[in-house]
Image: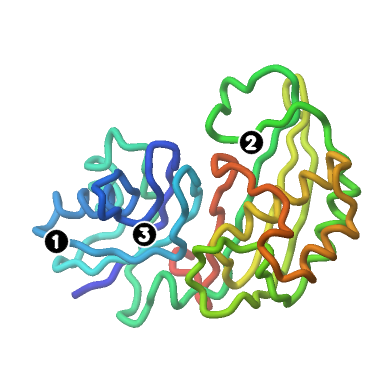
């Protein structure tokens, strides 16, 4: 059966996460599998690079699917998008890939961006797409706190107690924090890169760094929290709506060219 890689964009707000839910709650995976079933008799089961949580968005999620027909990638993307309406899910690209390609296990890196807006007035156009706080943050203090997390560490403090990863040790390759003009306030973007992440790791890190930016924590407190290897030492876990899966890296980009 031909295998296809799908690059997927979605608004996670209406969904209970990427993964199909046993309770019948809406999921992105179910929406895409349902669209596939309109093109070829199912059932279809697809695998994704990352199982994003409820409310988390994606601009470049990657999944793979095995189909019976030899589809032209462009026509397959167009047909899937037609059947995905009105769900806020779009297939950005489709590529034919080798049979041993796996969206999750072939990936060598993942990139997330978190959007945080600081302003007094309620957010309107980006409601459900950013985390809003009222006061500006100290970006240099947050950068100093983030520097404590770069490299290979035991991230027990920064992972959910429900995390199923075999080891809490991960290598965080990059945490970059940038500041951008925003109507009536300021937007802060947190860009994180690693081979893989623990459950709730990004949201735990951003929630902790926000405390540093607000002056409630110091960068040294981040170092102490990491060293504690204790979930109770973590700062608040920030809400899901500001988080985006923005890229997945493979040894050979399936969508290149």
Give the foreground label among 1 and 3. Answer: 1
Q: Residues within 10 Å of mark 1 (few under 14, many from 20)?
A: few
* Residue bearing the label numbered 1: 43
> The residue tagged with tag 2: helix, strand or loop?
strand
Name the quadrant containing residue 103. Answer: bottom left
Residue that appears at 69% across and 54% down: 191
* Residue bearing the label numbered 3: 6
Q: Residues within 10 Å of mark 3 (few under 14, many from 20)?
A: many
**Would residue 87 be found to the left or right of residue 192 on screen?**
left
Q: CA distance from mark 2 to mark 1?
A: 37 Å
> The residue tagged with tag 3: helix, strand or loop?
strand
Q: As drawn, which residue projects farthest toward the top?
A: 121
Residue that appears at 75% across and 30% down: 118
> The residue tagged with tag 1: helix, strand or loop?
loop
| Nearer-the-camera pick, 5 or 229 | 229
Colour scheme in the image?
Answer: rainbow
Residue that appears at 82% across and 59% down: 222
Residue 131 position in % (x across, y down): 64, 36
Residue 10 position in % (x across, y down): 43, 44
Give the numbered dot on residue 131.
Answer: 2
């Amino acid at each position: 059966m031909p295998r296809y890689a799908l690059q997927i964009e979605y608004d996670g707000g209406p969904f209970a996460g990427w993964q199909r839910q046993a309770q019948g709650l809406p999921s992105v995976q179910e929406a895409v599998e349902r669209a596939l079933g309109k093109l070829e008799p199912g059932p279809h089961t697809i695998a994704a690079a990352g199982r994003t949580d409820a409310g988390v968005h994606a601009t470049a999620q990657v999944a793979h699917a095995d189909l019976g027909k030899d589809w032209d990638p462009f026509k397959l993307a167009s047909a899937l998008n037609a059947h995905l309406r009105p769900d806020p899910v779009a297939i950005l690209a489709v590529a034919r890939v080798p049979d041993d390609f796996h969206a999750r296990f072939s990936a060598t890196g993942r990139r997330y961006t978190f959007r945080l807006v600081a302003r007094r007035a309620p957010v309107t156009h980006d409601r459900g797409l950013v985390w809003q706080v009222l006061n500006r943050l100290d970006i240099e203090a947050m950068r100093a706190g983030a520097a404590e997390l770069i490299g290979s560490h035991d991230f027990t403090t920064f992972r959910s107690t429900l995390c199923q990863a075999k080891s809490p040790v991960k290598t965080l390759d990059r945490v970059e924090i940038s500041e951008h003009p925003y109507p009536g306030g300021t937007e802060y973007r947190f860009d994180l890169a690693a081979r893989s992440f623990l459950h709730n790791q990004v949201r735990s890190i951003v929630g902790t760094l926000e405390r540093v930016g607000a002056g409630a924590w110091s960068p040294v407190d981040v170092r102490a929290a990491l060293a504690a290897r204790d979930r109770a030492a973590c700062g608040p876990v920030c809400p899901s709506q500001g988080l985006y899966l923005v890229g997945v890296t493979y040894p050979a980009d399936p969508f290149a060219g």
